[in-house]
Image: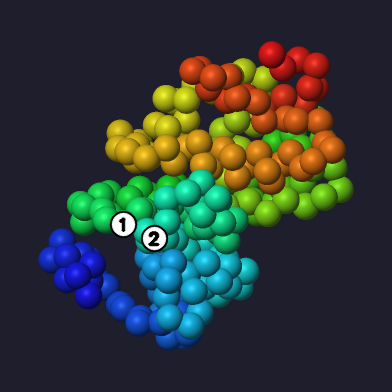
Amino acid sequence: ANIQDYLEGQGWAVDHAPNGALAIHKLIEGKFSAGVFDLNLPGLGGLELCARVRASIAPSLPVLILTAADALEDRLRGFQAGADDYLIKPFAPAELVARLQAIIRRASGSSRALAETLQVGDLRLQTSTREAHRGTRRLTLTNMGFLILQKLMQRSPAIVLRSELESHLWGDEPPGSDSLRTHIAHLRATIDPPGSPPMLHTHRGVGFQILGDPSRSE
């Protein structure tokens, strides 16, 4: 209720659901620019709600998850379910607005992206459909994972500076928490499964790089 009051005071049109089941009904019936899901919704939790939204209800809906959990594994679970961003309680309402504006802006910009097929080694990305494959295995990307991977593949084999990647994702308002590290960790787990030659490389203090030939990494 506090979030709704604040957002409406900022000029947003807001609908509220007290539980996950009602949220699904509202998402099916209405059209929304973004969703804010609490991790501990009664009944159907925020993670399961997010996964269902991504799977069929509104696959392109920007989603921000609210939670009191701050462990890396908790954030990874949120991104695995398809969340675009993650806000830790307690938070300033102004930060929530900034985060919402950022994920809505990213979703709008990516939907207008020109179609292209990117390939580095056995990793392929179709930007118009967001389909990604490594070899014959299809990869499931979050919205943020897609944006990061697209940027890294477009620039491969060059290293993309951390600051440049943060600017690409968040503009002039990068989040205070280490969100990029969490998104990179989730993307690495997606494209570099155990037993596969690693393609996503971290250059500490510098940036990140996608390489098709592991022998070329540092």
Amino acid type, callout 1: Lys
Q: Residue at x 79, y 22 (%)?
A: 214
Local packing at callout 2 (Cα closer than 10 Å; few below 14, some 14-19, many 20+) is some
Q: Determine contact: label 1, label 2, CB under 8 Å.
A: yes
Q: Is residue 22 above or below residue 110?
A: below
Q: Residue at x 51, y 17 (%)?
A: 206
In the rendered image, which residue does mark 2 sit on? 67
> Image check: 31 left or right of 157?
left
Q: Is residue 109 above or below residue 100?
A: above
Q: Residue at x 84, y 38 (%)?
A: 195
Precedes in sequence: disc 1 or disc 2: 2
Secondary structure at badge 1 equals: loop
Task: Looking at this view, name the residue that lies furthest to the left.
Answer: 9
Local packing at callout 1 (Cα closer than 10 Å; few below 14, some 14-19, many 20+) is few
Q: Residue 127 at what x, y percent from top left?
A: 63, 45
Amino acid type, callout 2: Thr
Q: Residue 38 at what x, y percent from top left?
A: 39, 68
Residue 29 shows up from this direction? no
Quadrant assignment, res 152: top right
Quadrant assignment, res 153: top right
**Front one among 47 and 139:** 47
Disc 1 and disc 2: Cα gap in Å?
A: 6 Å
In the rendered image, which residue does mark 1 sit on? 89
Secondary structure at badge 2 equals: strand
Quadrant assignment, res 97: bottom left
Q: Residue 59 at what x, y percent from top left?
A: 56, 65
> Image check: 165 left or right of 184?
left
Q: How many numbered discs? A: 2
Which label was assigned to residue 129? none
